[in-house]
Image (spheres, rainbow, N blue to C red):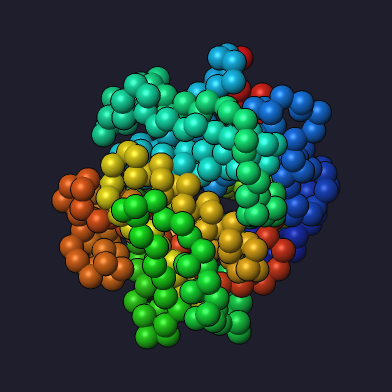
Amino acid sequence: MNRRKFIRLAGGGTIAAATAGTLAACGAVGSHYPAEAVEAWNGPVGENDARRRAVAYAITAPNPHNLQPWLVDLREQDVITLRTDPERVLPHTDPLGRQILIGHGAFLELLVMALAQQGVASDVLLWPQGELPTALKDWDNRPVARITLQPGGQPDPLFAQVLQRHTPKTDFDTTRPVAPALLAQLLNSAQAHTPLRVGGTVNADQLPALRTLCGESARVELLTPRTMMESIHLTRVGPAEILQHRDGISINSPFVRAVSALGLFDRSAPPAEGSAAYNNAMGRFEGHSRTAMGFVWITGPNTRTDQIHTGRLYVRQQLQATALGVGMHPMSQAVQEFAEMAPHFERVHQLVLGRRAPRSSEEATVQMFCRMGYPQGEVPATPRRPLARFVRT
């Protein structure tokens, strides 16, 4: 949308009347997601099979762009085979599939926890047919993990947080600093998979550089046409689209819904720098960056197995943050591996590890980089697809 036209519409009585009429035609004017789109967060209903119940919890796992890229095969008795949905990857923002596999690690950890809650232990075998190749174009149907069920699982205290864990994608409360003792408690609670390491800071001297990095790297993602279009194609506006897809980037604010319904929300091309759409998106990223009251990260080698272990560690860390009442939100742009991000990829390694960016999978890599702070209001659940969409029987 042309910026001048946007301002004229937003400021005039005509758009106000049109907005009210359009929203009335669309249904309710609230910003909450349709209840059916977030029903997964109520836990499994009517599921008696231990494996299906566990999968119902695991689909709430954090994952990039809310793609929910998991497929589970239950055709072998007492076994769950986890694969990647080849249609649910991010070739432009995640060209090596690293973030997708971190999402699989988070899914796997919640799956194991949910089985243990039912008294079922898990024998997890990663990559039973070998690791996935480096390039996404070479990925095939080989399993990520084969989980064999055994008697004797021990419930995990963090399981109580699984359905309470939501990722805060809003500005944090800058009047509430994160205490060093709370950060220490969060980091000390992490049971790192060697050789992964956890770290973080709430030091006022370190925060400005990290905040700046977040904002500048977000700007690169927005101004790189192919990465921006990847997000635009996954954007779901309004209750009907959100309910239809139940994935991707959900936007349900009344004004954006009205603008979309009036045909003024252009999804055919990336927004130009300085346009209203660009300024709106960049304003959100700047707000997220500016209000970060601390940062936490996970570092370690970058093999496929390390990526899975990173996801398992990350979701446990976020569950612990939920228990402590503090929010964790990945600011993943600087650790993305597409070419235009290279200067910021280098910078995040200098700031976090004090060394150059890795040149091989064996060198230390910043796997997760998250801002933290206290949300200013309720953090909504993110839509999830129905359980049946993930299960192959």
- Residue closer to the observer: 104 or 31: 104
264 lies above or below 141: below
Q: Residue at x 65, y 63 (%)?
A: 323
Find residue 104 and report its horizontal and vertical position in percent.
47, 38
Residue 130, position as x, y percentages in the image: 31, 25
Pick the residue in front: 269 or 310: 310
The answer to which of 73 and 76 lies nearer the viewer is: 76
Q: Image quadrant of residue 150?
A: top right
Residue 38 pos. (x, y %): 72, 43
Q: Residue at x 44, y 66 (%)?
A: 296
The quarter of the rendered structure image containing the C terminus is top right
Observer-nearest of 54 and 92: 54
> Which picture quadrant has residue 74?
top right
Q: Give left or right: position of 81 versus 54.
A: left
Rendered location of residue 110, percent (x, y): 58, 42
Is 330 drawn above or below residue 77 in the view shown? below
Residue 52, visible in the rendered structure: yes
Please state if 311 lies on the left or on the right of 42 as rendered.
Answer: left
**Furthest-front residue in this view:** 152
- Residue at position x 47%, y 26% from top? 146
Quick check: can you spot residue 262? no
Please tell me which residue is depicted at 39% across the width and 67% down the height of the picture.
199
Q: How many marks?
A: 0
